[in-house]
């Protein structure tokens, strides 16, 4: 196929130092080439590249063939192009979040006709609107809050398990008294005492993560998406587009704090950073 600026071909070096440049699957190439020429603003990047080992004409000990392509519009993924195998041979595969909703079984749109595959792309590929961005962000937010809750639960549970045999008759009533009891108990070891020291802070962190997760599950959170220079804000099922200056002070402060943490990490009583541009905040009246 033509060498086009918006089509990327991965490169690797074999064990002998020979550079290997991937080629496009011969069945997929006409579709990628036609779309790349029609949409020079899109980028076509390898999503799945198969290696074939053995001596090749280049002298390298393997070759690479691109079998699935990710289509991007700047930083937004528009969908996937690829090949699908049937008993009669190959066919084109076109898929993104919109085509998934159109299919009751399987995934993506599949056809043997090049023009029909292009029509599927023209119909379903394109940047997401605000509603689609909110829907995707809502799903990712539920996943992120579940993850941070689970991540905080495991160390809290492990700390509890380290001391539970000694603590089962006392710890629920009074943690400080239990710690004093352990320090004077001859059967208590250093690991158990260290676990007790950690337990209050781990429990407090987990409680905070539970509050964030609960807020999202009950749809009480404020979902904020950075969209270019503006923010898309969803709260109480109302969606608004605001500039930074128009954001409520606690939202602006919360987003500012969450920008300082890693993706899928949370700040107690503030919220969680879902991804690079998505933030879920707990409203002030939900903070414990």
Image (cartoon, grey):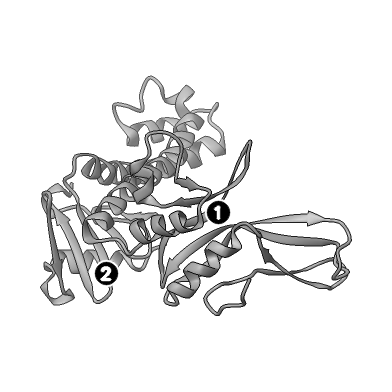
Mark 1 against mark 2, which lies toward the viewer?
A: 1
Which of the pair 231/52 is nearer the observer? 52
Q: Quadrant of the N terminus?
A: bottom right
Question: From the viewer's perspective, is 245 left or right of 271?
Answer: left
As rendered, which of 251 and 111 lies closer to the eye? 111
Q: Which residue reaches farthest top? A: 169
Rate crowding at label 2 as few (under 14), some (14 to 19) or many (20 or more) other CA atoms within 10 Å: some
Answer whether residue 86 is visible to the viewer in this image: yes
Residue at image position (26%, 55%) is 132
- Residue found farthest to the bottom: 5
Dot 1: what SS? Answer: strand
**Residues at badges 1 and 2 in contact (C-beta under 8 Å)?**
no
* Quadrant in the picture for residue 105: top left
**Number of disc labels:** 2
Sequence order check, earlier mark of 1 and 2: 1
Q: Residues within 10 Å of mark 1 (few under 14, many from 20)?
A: many
Question: Which label is found at residue 227?
Answer: 2
| C-alpha span from label 1 to label 2 | 29 Å
- Label annotation for residue 68: none
The residue sitting at 44% across, 67% down in the picture is 72
Residue 149 rendering spot, x and y as whole percentages: 36, 42
Query: What secondary structure is marked by label 2?
Result: strand
Q: Is residue 200 visible?
A: no
Residue 287 x %, y %: 17, 49
**Residue 261 percent across, percent down from the top left:** 38, 63
**Dividing the picture into quarters, in which one does residue 253 lie?**
bottom left
Residue 278 against residue 198 in the figure, above or below: below
Report the front residue among 75 and 215.
75
- 81 displayed left or right of 39: right
Query: Where residue 275 sits in the image (x, y, percent)?
Result: 37, 59
- Label 1: which residue? 82
């Amino acid at each position: 196929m033509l060498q086009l600026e918006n089509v990327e071909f991965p490169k690797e070096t074999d064990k002998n130092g020979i550079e290997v440049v991937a080629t496009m699957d011969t069945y997929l190439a006409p579709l990628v080439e036609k779309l790349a020429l029609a949409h020079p603003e899109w980028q076509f990047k390898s999503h799945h590249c198969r290696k074939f080992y053995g001596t090749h004409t280049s002298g390298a000990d393997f070759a690479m063939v691109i079998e699935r392509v990710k289509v991007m519009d700047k930083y937004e993924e528009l969908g996937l192009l690829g090949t699908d195998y049937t008993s009669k041979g190959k066919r084109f595969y076109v898929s993104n979040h919109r085509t998934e909703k159109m299919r009751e079984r399987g995934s993506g749109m599949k056809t043997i006709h090049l023009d029909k595959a292009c029509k599927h792309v023209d119909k379903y590929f394109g940047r997401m609107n605000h509603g689609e961005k909110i829907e995707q962000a809502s799903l990712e937010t539920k996943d992120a809050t579940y993850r941070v809750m689970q991540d905080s639960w495991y160390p809290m549970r492990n700390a509890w398990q380290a001391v539970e045999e000694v603590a089962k008759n006392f710890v629920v009533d009074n943690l400080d008294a239990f710690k004093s009891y352990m320090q004077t108990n001859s059967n208590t070891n250093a690991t158990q005492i260290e676990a007790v020291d950690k337990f209050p802070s781990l429990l407090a962190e987990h409680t905070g993560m539970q509050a964030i997760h609960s807020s999202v599950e009950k749809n009480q959170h404020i979902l904020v998406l950075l969209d270019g220079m503006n923010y898309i804000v969803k709260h109480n099922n109302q969606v608004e587009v605001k500039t930074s200056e128009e954001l409520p002070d606690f939202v602006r402060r919360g987003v500012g704090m969450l920008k300082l943490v890693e993706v899928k990490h949370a700040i107690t009583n503030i919220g969680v950073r879902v991804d690079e541009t998505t933030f879920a905040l707990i409203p002030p009246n939900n903070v414990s």
